Amino acid sequence: MNSSLELRNVSLSYQSKGKESVVFHSLSVSFPIKGISVILGASGVGKTTLLSFIAGILPGEGEIAFEGKRIDQLPPNRREIAYVTQDYRLYPHMTVFENIAFPLRIMHASREEIERRVGEIAKRLDISFLLSRKPKALSGGQQQTIALARSLIWNPSILLLDEPFSGLDPNSRVECRHFFQTVLRDFPVTTLLVTHSWDDAMAIGDRVYVIQDRKISFEGTPV
Protein backbone atom coordinates (compact mmCIF):
# COMPACT_ATOMS: atom_id res chain seq x y z
CA MET A 1 0.00 0.00 0.00
CA ASN A 2 1.23 3.50 -0.86
CA SER A 3 1.52 5.25 2.50
CA SER A 4 1.15 8.85 1.38
CA LEU A 5 -1.15 11.64 0.32
CA GLU A 6 -0.23 12.39 -3.27
CA LEU A 7 -0.96 15.26 -5.62
CA ARG A 8 -0.35 14.32 -9.25
CA ASN A 9 -0.02 16.92 -12.02
CA VAL A 10 -2.22 19.44 -10.25
CA SER A 11 -2.98 22.66 -12.12
CA LEU A 12 -4.96 25.46 -10.48
CA SER A 13 -5.93 28.86 -11.82
CA TYR A 14 -8.51 31.61 -11.35
CA GLN A 15 -10.07 34.37 -13.41
CA SER A 16 -9.34 37.98 -12.45
CA LYS A 17 -10.53 40.96 -14.51
CA GLY A 18 -11.04 38.74 -17.53
CA LYS A 19 -7.57 37.21 -17.34
CA GLU A 20 -6.51 33.77 -16.16
CA SER A 21 -3.95 33.69 -13.35
CA VAL A 22 -2.08 30.42 -12.91
CA VAL A 23 -1.51 29.33 -9.30
CA PHE A 24 0.08 25.93 -9.99
CA HIS A 25 0.92 24.07 -13.16
CA SER A 26 1.51 20.29 -13.15
CA LEU A 27 2.38 20.23 -9.45
CA SER A 28 3.23 16.78 -8.11
CA VAL A 29 4.13 16.17 -4.48
CA SER A 30 3.79 13.42 -1.88
CA PHE A 31 3.06 13.92 1.84
CA PRO A 32 3.64 11.10 4.37
CA ILE A 33 0.63 9.84 6.28
CA LYS A 34 0.16 10.00 10.05
CA GLY A 35 2.45 12.99 10.41
CA ILE A 36 2.48 16.80 10.22
CA SER A 37 3.51 18.22 6.86
CA VAL A 38 3.93 22.00 6.76
CA ILE A 39 3.46 23.93 3.54
CA LEU A 40 5.44 27.16 3.88
CA GLY A 41 5.20 30.18 1.63
CA ALA A 42 4.58 33.90 1.45
CA SER A 43 1.07 35.31 1.35
CA GLY A 44 -0.53 34.95 -2.07
CA VAL A 45 1.47 31.96 -3.33
CA GLY A 46 -1.56 29.65 -3.30
CA LYS A 47 -1.36 27.79 0.01
CA THR A 48 -5.03 28.20 0.88
CA THR A 49 -6.01 27.53 -2.73
CA LEU A 50 -4.17 24.22 -2.57
CA LEU A 51 -5.93 23.18 0.64
CA SER A 52 -9.29 24.12 -0.83
CA PHE A 53 -8.58 21.99 -3.89
CA ILE A 54 -7.62 18.99 -1.73
CA ALA A 55 -10.81 19.45 0.31
CA GLY A 56 -12.89 19.54 -2.87
CA ILE A 57 -14.04 23.14 -2.35
CA LEU A 58 -12.28 24.60 -5.40
CA PRO A 59 -12.09 22.98 -8.84
CA GLY A 60 -8.85 22.18 -10.58
CA GLU A 61 -7.03 19.66 -12.74
CA GLY A 62 -5.01 16.69 -11.56
CA GLU A 63 -5.31 13.75 -9.22
CA ILE A 64 -5.37 13.38 -5.43
CA ALA A 65 -4.62 9.95 -3.99
CA PHE A 66 -4.62 8.84 -0.36
CA GLU A 67 -2.97 5.53 0.50
CA GLY A 68 -3.01 4.61 -3.19
CA LYS A 69 -6.71 5.36 -3.76
CA ARG A 70 -7.90 8.38 -5.70
CA ILE A 71 -10.15 10.75 -3.77
CA ASP A 72 -10.37 13.66 -6.21
CA GLN A 73 -13.37 12.03 -7.88
CA LEU A 74 -15.27 11.90 -4.57
CA PRO A 75 -17.55 14.69 -3.31
CA PRO A 76 -16.11 16.70 -0.39
CA ASN A 77 -18.23 14.93 2.24
CA ARG A 78 -16.80 11.55 1.26
CA ARG A 79 -13.11 12.43 1.29
CA GLU A 80 -12.78 12.02 5.09
CA ILE A 81 -11.14 15.44 5.29
CA ALA A 82 -11.52 17.98 8.11
CA TYR A 83 -10.63 21.56 7.19
CA VAL A 84 -9.95 24.20 9.86
CA THR A 85 -9.92 27.69 8.32
CA GLN A 86 -8.15 30.79 9.64
CA ASP A 87 -11.32 32.17 11.24
CA TYR A 88 -12.22 28.84 12.95
CA ARG A 89 -15.91 29.24 11.91
CA LEU A 90 -17.41 28.42 15.27
CA TYR A 91 -21.17 28.91 15.53
CA PRO A 92 -21.66 31.93 17.84
CA HIS A 93 -25.17 30.94 18.96
CA MET A 94 -24.02 27.48 20.09
CA THR A 95 -22.17 26.46 23.22
CA VAL A 96 -18.74 24.88 23.01
CA PHE A 97 -20.36 21.48 23.59
CA GLU A 98 -22.77 22.06 20.70
CA ASN A 99 -20.00 23.28 18.40
CA ILE A 100 -17.86 20.21 19.05
CA ALA A 101 -20.87 17.90 18.73
CA PHE A 102 -22.07 19.40 15.44
CA PRO A 103 -20.34 16.88 13.10
CA LEU A 104 -21.74 13.98 15.12
CA ARG A 105 -25.25 15.41 14.89
CA ILE A 106 -24.86 15.66 11.12
CA MET A 107 -23.86 11.98 11.17
CA HIS A 108 -27.02 11.19 13.22
CA ALA A 109 -25.09 9.85 16.20
CA SER A 110 -27.18 9.02 19.26
CA ARG A 111 -27.38 11.46 22.17
CA GLU A 112 -25.49 8.99 24.35
CA GLU A 113 -22.67 8.64 21.83
CA ILE A 114 -22.44 12.40 21.36
CA GLU A 115 -22.19 13.02 25.09
CA ARG A 116 -19.59 10.30 25.49
CA ARG A 117 -17.39 11.39 22.59
CA VAL A 118 -17.57 15.10 23.35
CA GLY A 119 -16.73 14.35 26.97
CA GLU A 120 -13.79 12.20 25.93
CA ILE A 121 -12.22 14.70 23.56
CA ALA A 122 -12.87 17.60 25.94
CA LYS A 123 -11.01 15.75 28.68
CA ARG A 124 -8.24 14.79 26.29
CA LEU A 125 -7.74 18.43 25.22
CA ASP A 126 -8.33 19.79 28.75
CA ILE A 127 -11.31 21.92 27.74
CA SER A 128 -14.10 20.34 29.83
CA PHE A 129 -14.49 23.57 31.80
CA LEU A 130 -15.38 25.43 28.57
CA LEU A 131 -18.24 23.23 27.36
CA SER A 132 -21.07 25.46 28.57
CA ARG A 133 -19.57 28.71 27.24
CA LYS A 134 -20.25 30.50 23.96
CA PRO A 135 -17.41 31.27 21.50
CA LYS A 136 -17.48 35.02 22.26
CA ALA A 137 -16.39 34.23 25.82
CA LEU A 138 -13.25 32.39 24.64
CA SER A 139 -9.74 33.58 23.93
CA GLY A 140 -8.23 33.14 20.48
CA GLY A 141 -6.26 30.11 21.63
CA GLN A 142 -9.35 28.54 23.18
CA GLN A 143 -11.38 29.10 20.02
CA GLN A 144 -8.60 27.44 18.05
CA THR A 145 -8.67 24.43 20.38
CA ILE A 146 -12.46 24.12 20.04
CA ALA A 147 -12.16 24.21 16.24
CA LEU A 148 -9.53 21.48 16.45
CA ALA A 149 -11.72 19.36 18.74
CA ARG A 150 -14.66 19.71 16.35
CA SER A 151 -12.50 18.65 13.42
CA LEU A 152 -11.05 15.60 15.18
CA ILE A 153 -14.14 14.25 16.94
CA TRP A 154 -15.38 12.33 13.89
CA ASN A 155 -11.96 10.72 13.24
CA PRO A 156 -11.08 12.12 9.78
CA SER A 157 -8.26 10.58 7.76
CA ILE A 158 -6.85 13.97 6.70
CA LEU A 159 -6.70 17.25 8.62
CA LEU A 160 -6.11 20.54 6.79
CA LEU A 161 -5.05 23.54 8.90
CA ASP A 162 -4.94 27.01 7.31
CA GLU A 163 -2.62 29.40 9.19
CA PRO A 164 -3.83 28.15 12.60
CA PHE A 165 -1.57 30.49 14.60
CA SER A 166 -1.95 33.69 12.59
CA GLY A 167 -4.38 35.46 14.96
CA LEU A 168 -2.49 34.77 18.18
CA ASP A 169 -0.10 36.91 20.21
CA PRO A 170 3.52 35.68 20.41
CA ASN A 171 3.16 33.91 23.78
CA SER A 172 -0.08 32.17 22.79
CA ARG A 173 1.48 31.23 19.48
CA VAL A 174 4.32 29.36 21.17
CA GLU A 175 1.92 27.58 23.53
CA CYS A 176 -0.42 26.56 20.72
CA ARG A 177 2.41 25.23 18.56
CA HIS A 178 3.41 22.89 21.38
CA PHE A 179 -0.21 21.99 22.07
CA PHE A 180 -0.98 21.17 18.44
CA GLN A 181 2.19 19.14 18.06
CA THR A 182 1.41 17.12 21.20
CA VAL A 183 -2.27 16.58 20.37
CA LEU A 184 -1.81 15.64 16.73
CA ARG A 185 0.80 13.04 17.64
CA ASP A 186 -1.95 11.22 19.56
CA PHE A 187 -4.43 11.07 16.68
CA PRO A 188 -4.07 8.78 13.63
CA VAL A 189 -4.57 11.64 11.20
CA THR A 190 -2.52 12.93 8.26
CA THR A 191 -2.06 16.66 8.77
CA LEU A 192 -1.27 19.40 6.25
CA LEU A 193 -0.63 22.77 7.86
CA VAL A 194 -0.01 25.89 5.81
CA THR A 195 1.79 28.94 7.17
CA HIS A 196 3.87 31.92 6.11
CA SER A 197 5.96 31.64 9.30
CA TRP A 198 9.31 29.88 9.18
CA ASP A 199 9.22 29.61 12.99
CA ASP A 200 5.88 27.77 12.84
CA ALA A 201 7.19 25.39 10.21
CA MET A 202 10.36 24.57 12.12
CA ALA A 203 8.53 24.13 15.44
CA ILE A 204 5.73 21.81 14.37
CA GLY A 205 6.52 20.11 11.07
CA ASP A 206 7.77 16.57 10.52
CA ARG A 207 8.44 17.64 6.94
CA VAL A 208 8.46 21.11 5.40
CA TYR A 209 7.52 22.00 1.82
CA VAL A 210 8.34 25.50 0.56
CA ILE A 211 6.18 26.97 -2.21
CA GLN A 212 7.89 29.49 -4.45
CA ASP A 213 7.33 30.46 -8.09
CA ARG A 214 4.28 28.16 -8.39
CA LYS A 215 6.22 25.04 -7.42
CA ILE A 216 7.72 23.21 -4.45
CA SER A 217 11.19 24.73 -4.25
CA PHE A 218 12.30 22.85 -1.15
CA GLU A 219 11.28 19.69 0.70
CA GLY A 220 12.95 18.37 3.80
CA THR A 221 12.92 17.87 7.56
CA PRO A 222 13.27 20.76 10.04
CA VAL A 223 16.77 21.33 11.35
Image (spheres, rainbow, N blue to C red):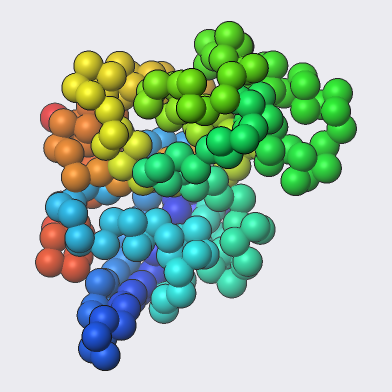
Q: Quadrant of residue 74?
A: bottom right
Q: Up-down: is 21 above or below 147?
A: below
The spot of residue 151 in percent (x, y) is 56, 37
Q: Quadrant of residue 58?
A: bottom left
Nearest the viewer among 156 and 123 is 123
Residue 158 can be seen, yes or no = no
Point 43% across, 65% down: residue = 53
The spot of residue 57 in percent (x, y) is 50, 64
State the quadrant of the C terminus.
Answer: top left
Residue at the extreme bottom of the image, as rendered: 18
The spot of residue 196 in percent (x, y) is 19, 45
Q: Quadrant of residue 188?
A: top right
Point 40% across, 21% down: residue = 139
Q: Is residue 160 left or right of residue 109?
A: left
Nearest the viewer among 113 and 182 is 113
Point 26% across, 62% down: residue = 46
Residue 208 can be seen, yes or no = yes
- Please count the marks in the image: 0
Nearest the viewer among 30 and 142 is 142
The spot of residue 202 in percent (x, y) is 19, 31
Nearest the viewer among 187 and 118 is 118
Point 83% across, 42% down: residue = 108
